[in-house]
Image (cartoon, rainbow, N blue to C red):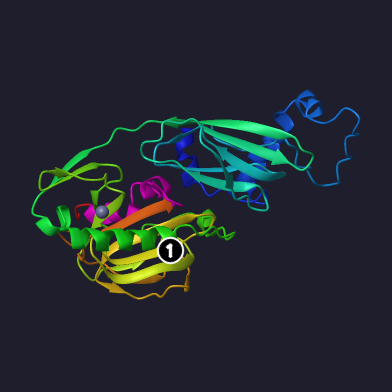
């Protein structure tokens, strides 16, 4: 199995049958010699508790690679802390009670991701995850209002303020694991824009497209792809129009842009499938569509990698009638 598909599989506690098997498999496959050299020689090995596999420092469930724009979903059971290492600094990554964690990979990250798990007895384990490069599309978009492509200074200042407000909302790091139940398509329709494509508006190169666009009529309800807490809801941002952010826990958030109506408020909990509002074309948009972006904190990731693909409902709708 291609390991880049791993993030689309919800990775849960050992109680889930499939993961239990693979986790137990890892426990059994690890040579005891590896376990023993990681423990101080003077310390007696703890007797196993009947019916439970003790977490050991060596038992981790981490894929060998993740795609650019992907979400690493993995487990380091028994670890007390986890750090994402870079040349500049070490960033702490939240661990769930079962050792589950997520790390988002940016569009241009070359990798490898370097992680360090720290255990209660002071031992550490370093992990390396390769980042698989992807090819990106070019998209030319003409007919966008010029003031949204090359805004005058007073508009540029407004855009900067609004983007700072959105960035501030994404700092949140909740212990909730709403992401772990997996993601569904927020609307069903033709995909009209993909993550990562280099966009050229009216001949001016702009930032790569940061999400997934689905072309559906204004007024189409947008459903929460996973449960979460609404952390941002404003009807009138300059570039993105009606804008809603939903936090799914562990720094993972969805954003919906260009909405014609917003039906949720900041602080509100939404369950998977709840209506967040309606599709529109507010802000910089050339036609009605749902734009869905996802972030791991400030890192933009590709929602399409978290979805069942292709969208079965959209396929069925597009199929010719007999
Ligand atoms: Zn878009």
3 left or right of 319? Answer: right
Q: Ligand 1 shows up in which quadrant of the image?
A: bottom left
Q: SS of the residue at dot 1?
A: strand
Using the rendered view, name the quadrant where residue 37 is placed.
Answer: top right
Residue in the foreground of this view, choosing between 73 and 119: 119
Identify the residue at horizontal 25%, vertical 42% (top origin).
197
Query: Mark 1 sits on what residue?
Result: 246
Find the magenta span and give its range.
Answer: 296-318
Residue 309 on the magenta span: yes
156 left or right of 172? Answer: left
289 left or right of 37? Answer: left
Identify the residue at horizontal 82%, vertical 47% (top origin).
51
Q: Is residue 302 above or below residue 216?
A: above
Identify the residue at horizontal 88%, vertical 35% (top origin).
45
* Residue sitting at the far left: 143
Dot 1 alpha-carbon crowd within 10 angstroms: few under 14, some 14 to 19, many 20 or more: many
Residue in the foreground of this view, choosing between 166 and 213: 166
* Residue sitting at the far front: 153
Residue 229 at what x, y percent from top left? 48, 67
Q: Quadrant of the C terminus?
A: bottom left
């Amino acid at each position: 199995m291609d390991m880049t598909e791993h993030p689309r599989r919800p990775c849960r506690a050992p109680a889930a049958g499939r993961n239990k098997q693979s986790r137990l498999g890892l426990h059994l496959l690890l040579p005891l010699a590896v376990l023993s050299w990681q423990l101080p020689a003077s310390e007696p090995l703890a007797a196993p508790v009947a019916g439970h596999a003790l977490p050991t420092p060596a038992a981790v469930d981490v894929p060998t690679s993740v795609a650019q724009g992907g979400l690493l979903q993995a487990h380091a059971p028994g670890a007390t802390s986890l750090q994402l290492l870079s040349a500049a600094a070490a960033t702490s990554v939240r661990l769930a009670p079962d050792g589950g964690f997520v790390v988002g990979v940016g569009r241009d990250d070359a990798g490898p991701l370097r992680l360090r798990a720290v255990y209660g007895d002071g031992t550490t384990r370093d992990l390396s995850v390769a980042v698989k490069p992807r090819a990106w599309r070019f998209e030319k978009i003409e007919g966008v209002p010029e003031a949204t492509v090359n805004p005058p200074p007073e508009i540029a200042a407004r855009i900067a303020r609004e983007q700072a407000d959105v960035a501030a909302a994404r700092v949140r790091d909740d212990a909730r694991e709403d992401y772990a139940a997996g993601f569904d398509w927020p609307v069903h329709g033709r995909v009209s824009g993909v993550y990562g494509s280099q966009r050229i508006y009216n001949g001016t190169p702009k930032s790569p497209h940061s999400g997934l666009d689905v072309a559906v009529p204004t007024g189409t309800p947008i459903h929460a792809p996973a449960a979460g807490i609404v952390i941002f809801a404003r009807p009138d941002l300059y570039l993105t129009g009606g804008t809603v952010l939903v936090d799914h826990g562990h720094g993972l958030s969805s954003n919906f842009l260009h909405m014609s109506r917003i039906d949720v408020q900041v602080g509100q909990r939404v369950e998977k499938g709840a209506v967040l509002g309606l599709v529109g074309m507010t802000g910089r948009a050339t036609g009605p569509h749902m734009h869905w972006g996802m972030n791991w904190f400030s890192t933009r990731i590709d929602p399409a990698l978290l979805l069942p693909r292709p969208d079965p409902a959209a396929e069925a709708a597009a199929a010719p009638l007999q």
